[in-house]
Image (cartoon, rainbow, N blue to C red):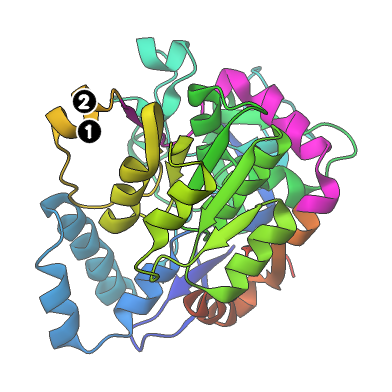
Amino acid sequence: MKVAAIFPDGTAGLAEEPDPFPKEDFVLLKLHSVPMCTEWHTFEREREPREEREKRERDLPPEMRERIRRQRESLMQRGFMPVRGHEAAGEVVEVVQPGLVQVGDRVVVQPQYACGKCALCLVGEHIHCQHGRDVRAITGSSSGTATMAQYMLKPDYLLSPIPDGVSYDHASMAVCGLGPTFGAMQQMQVNSLDTVLITGLGPVGLGGVINAHYLSARIIGVESVSYRADLAKKLGADIVINPNDVNALKQIMDLTGGIGVDKAVDCSGNPLGERLCIDAARRKGQVTFVGQCQELTIGPGRDLISKGLTLRGSWHYNIGEYPKLMKIIQESSEVLDKFITHTFPMSKIQEAFELQITGNCGKIVLHPWE
């Protein structure tokens, strides 16, 4: 089968991997829609001059440096580095034992390989599972673990049904396109009386705009890329502020009568964006971090005790809430057509990566069979 890959010369394209075979509760999926997320960082990193790359990587956490080391080892040994990805929608094409899905089922592929048996998995919080399954040990091969591929393997309990009438492209937004911010909105119980601040309007933050708009909240966005600021307004943001404006915080406070926003979601993964959410939140407000940064200074007395803020993280959403998210998708078809700004055949992944680097896009979807 064909998989997306990065090559030693820094280019991206397609490579061949063995077709995966289902085993036990791992079923074989033919993938039709593969959204792109943060994989472009790897593409950009591998094109950097070696000295610059090594200097930047020295500041990364040890576990991230180790992951990069393994990726680069694969690159040198195999002549290419598969782009694994973590979002997809497709069709069940083979099962080897009775289970939760059947051949022909259309499904959204949930991320990771959670055990499905621990306390967290049993209550729908599979994203936080500490006992992930070893696909290589179970199937005898690492082939089939990438979403940026024509086929993949997944345990049946991590496949969510796609209703009739919902396209694969739209259904695939139930992963990182809408998922992390949907989880954030659910935890904060966002409603029509709220003013919600969203910092960082990349694809995840734009998905947050869609989720908050669906809930009829007032939305203040923060974004420096004009393309995405304009797109956010088309998706439902009431106003978008440039974070490079020294008066950004004052603008937010003025827009809320000096009180601050009710709820805030950071999707930038930038300490400045996260700090802005904390500073702009009203007393007894709520802040949820979706974007991941390395360090952020929080003052327990100033931020938590005096302001009474609730701070939390949102990586994904409780899988039991999937029907609610799918309802948003079903009722937001026209909005999702604006959100998905570009689609590419998977063979043009380099062109897609280069577009992502510019920031002049919303969500991008690859089609593995084109």
> Residue 64: percent from the left, percent from the top?
20, 55
Up-down: is 56 above or below 259? below
Going by the image, does 226 lie left or right of 33?
left
Number of marks in the rendered image: 2
Up-down: is 98 above or below 281? above
Residue in the image at 41% along x and 43% along y? 290
Q: Secondary structure at mark 1?
A: helix
Residue in the image at 29% along x and 57% along y? 272
Q: Nearer the viewer, residue 11 or 293?
A: 293
Residue in the image at 39% along x and 22% along y? 115
The residue tagged 2 is 306
- Residue neighbourhood size for the residue with mark 1, other residues' Cα within 10 Å, grouped as few (<14), some (14–19), many (≥20): some
What are the residue bounds of the magenta stretch? 309-335
> Residue 43: percent from the left, percent from the top?
39, 75
Q: Secondary structure at mark 2?
A: helix
Which amino acid does the dot numbered 2 rest on? Ser
Marker disc for residue 303? 1
Q: Quadrant of the N terminus?
A: bottom right
